[in-house]
Image (tube, grey):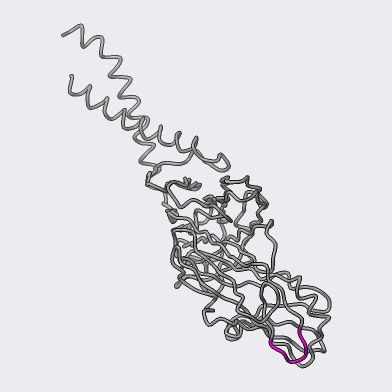
Amino acid sequence: MKKLLIVLLCLSMLAFGACSTVESIAGKGDGSIVDEKVTTSEQLPNEQVVEETETQTLITDVVGFPEVVEGYGLYGATVTVKNVYPGWSGSAPVTIVNGKDQRRTFHLMLQQPGETVKEGYAPFPEEYFDWITIEDLNPEVALGGVKKVSVTLSSPYGFPSEMRGNNYEVRILVEDWSQTGFIQLALQAKWLITFAD
Amino acid sequence: MKRFRKRMAPLVGLLVALTLLLVPAGNVMAANPTVSMNVTAGIISINNTMSTWALGYATLDEVIYFSADGSQDDDYSLIGNTGNLAVDVEIQGTNFTGDPISWTLATGADKDQFALVADVGDAGTYSVEVKSSSYVDITTDLASMATIVWSMKFTAPDEFDATEAGDIKTATVTLVVSEHT
């Protein structure tokens, strides 16, 4: 009897443990797009990968990276998404780390990659840019501040059959609209997307 | 022992019910397709010293430089990778407007000429070349904490009109930085 009780107790604790993980992930995010359908999670030192069905959110935390004193930096430079199927939707943040020199206003927009497109990947077709939404196109970030801007890919149920099984790359341009001068800098985050067969 | 079993019976029932309730739910979810998402752990960041450049006064068929004061000395721009990931740096011409000059950034085969082409209608086109030999897109695979020096020169065509050069001064060149592919 005691053994049965212990086995059942362990099983119950395991089951409860899985549920409590979901709750903690949902609570830690920026709150923009977090779905309760999250089923599993894996905590890595500087990234968090969340796997689930239908809706997925990737949560990242900037920890232990070089301090940005001047200018700005971007965390989440490359997001890889594999096995995207019709009807799936997923989010990941572009994290802007502002330097300690000034307050900045940024502008975010989608772009196709230039000549540095990843080998084996094609530029994500511009006509489907509306599958991707950027939470805040013009965020302001305080001096030394960090701002997470959620980017969401929503694959429609009837996406073109020629995209199945193929790899695409799309860039998210992050421009500092506060800068002046002839030579200006902009950073790009990449999304490498592989569609399911 | 009997009393213990009697007391534990409801608790066992509750645990069995909870187990049955939660375990099948997990099995159903596992059967669905899995999409994986991951992100590079690292930060891209870059700085550019001497970013305020101007186009100097030009006469016909003369080579002039984009530099801090428009002079033809060895002014340059210094790009430094201050992040912890290797990066690629590409050029995008933006805001190349200003009647009568409008600029487009050519790509592909013309890239080696830096290929900023100013279309001024009947007056023809201007070409802009990179002065520094370090220009390769400007660069690919710029390592963390590494720097690169670059500059540009402008070759005025026969039809060059100095008054049009004033418009060019308002243009911007954007260096676009992404994680090295």
Classify B84 as above or below B70: above
Residue A197 visible in this rendered orientation of the protein = no
Classify B26 as above or below A82: above
Q: Quadrant of the N terminus of chain B?
A: top left
Front position in the image: A167 or A164? A167
Front position in the image: B109 or B67? B67
- The quarter of the picture where residue B103 lies is bottom right
At a point 31% along the width and 32% down the height, the residue shown is: A14
In this picture, residue A113 sits left or right of residue B8 = right
Query: Please, what is the dominant secondary structure of the magenta stretch?
Result: loop
- The quarter of the picture where residue A83 lies is bottom left
In this picture, residue A181 sits left or right of residue A98 = right
Magenta stretch bounds: B58-63
Measured from the top left, where is residue B5 in percent x and y?
Answer: 21, 12
Classify A135 as above or below B46: above
Is residue A155 one of those drawn in magenta?
A: no
At a point 72% along the width and 77% down the height, the residue shown is: B55
In this picture, residue A165 sits left or right of residue B100 = left
At a point 58% along the width and 42% down the height, the residue shown is: A32
In this picture, residue A25 sits left or right of residue B174 = left
Is residue B59 one of those drawn in magenta?
A: yes
Measured from the top left, where is residue A102 in percent x and y?
Answer: 64, 50
Residue that sits furthest to the left in the current view:
B1
